[in-house]
Amino acid sequence: MSHSNTTEFINPSTIILLGIPGLEAAYVWLSIPFCIMYIIIILGNFFILFIVKIEPSLHEPMYYFLCMLAVTDLVLSSSTLPKMLIIFWFNSREIDFNACILQVFFVHCFAVMESGIFLAMAFDRYVAICHPLRHSTILTNPVVARIGLAAALRGIMIIFPYPFLLRRWLYCRTNVLPHTHCDHIYMVKLACGDTSISSYYGLFVLFSGKCVDIFFITISYFQILRAVFRLPTKEARLKTLGTCTSHICAILAFYIPSFFSSFTQRFGKSLPLHFHVPIANIYLLVPPMLNPIIYGVRSKQMRERLLRLFNCASKS
């Protein structure tokens, strides 16, 4: 297919992913940290799923939500990173148009799901600290399952219009995408004509998904802080806040790069592509890598279970 800027075509059969424009000479070196990150993501999140499955003491709402987060992180990173490494290692830049649309859906859908899971985890912390005697009756296993299903359905419903909006545009400029993966806003920039509906809907997704979640997470932690400061001793306050540390760190690791990437894409037009593209990848890859480390290090129960596994392995 011609890459001409003058040829008009609708739904090109392939999209050409450039990777990180301007850093082509460093692809081999760049692949090393990204490959290490992917290995950590795979091992770390499967470790979370395995430990929670085999340890009965971890069969409680917070760890069920953590398992949902691990599955979401695995899908989110696996939707983009393998193709990125293929570009870096083999210079294989083509991706089928339908596969590109599917990648857009998976990336944004699971990002919204992850945001919803963080909100669910904040609700769990709120109930555990503000209503500790009712925690087991409020967050029963069926309720936890329904919350997880609601987070998944919300992500699907909010992102469902993306593929249809992207298919309706006339791609008359080029089929070359200056990115490592297919991203909604970059696909919109390839299209001709008035694509404002896609741009506005992208902002709607940002605010109706992540911004709404941040609002309710903030309210949850406001109530948590009120309850904590009512505790009689400093030791009790610190111990209670310590149960929220992992969740707060994970939230910051997810939302800060996410919003920074979204706003630089829309308002940082003067910034070079070799700045935009890595930032977009950081928000998709760093949180899935950090979440197992954060929760694995902070959770005493998970550390103890891991030590028992190592002791059993060494004795055998």
Image (spheres, grey):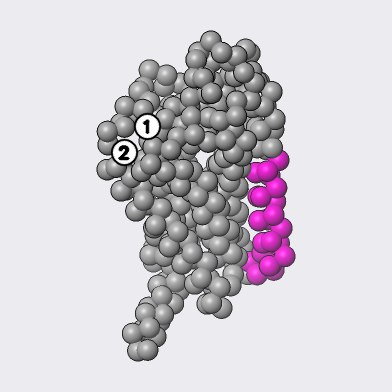
Q: What residue type is labelled 2?
A: Tyr
| Kind of element beneath mark 2 | helix
Above or below, 68 relative to 186: below
Residue 139 forms part of the magenta stretch: yes
Q: Main secondary structure of the magenta part?
A: helix
Residue 177 lies, in percent from the top left, at 48, 27
Residue shown at the point (44%, 27%) measured from the top left: 178
The front one of 85 and 257 is: 85
Residue 209: image quadrant is top right
Above or below, 205 relative to 144: above
Give whichever of discs 2 and 1 has the lower sequence position: 1
Q: In this view, does 233 lie to the left or right of 148?
A: left
Residue 197: image quadrant is top right
Residue shown at the point (55%, 26%) measured from the top left: 187
Considering every residue shown, the one lying at the far top of the view is: 6
| Kind of element beneath mark 1 | loop
Considering every residue shown, the one lying at the far bottom of the view is: 315
Q: Is residue 275 left or right of residue 301?
A: left
Asked if the residue under mark 1 is in contact with the one under mark 2, i.e. CB atoms within 8 Å, the reply is yes
Residue 20, disc: 1
Label 2: which residue? 27
Residue 46, disc: none
Q: Which amino acid does label 1 sit on?
A: Ile
Residue 102 lies, in percent from the top left, at 61, 39
Q: What stretch is highlighted in magenta?
A: 135-157
Residue 159 lies, in percent from the top left, at 65, 37
Q: Residues within 10 Å of mark 2 (few under 14, many from 20)?
A: some
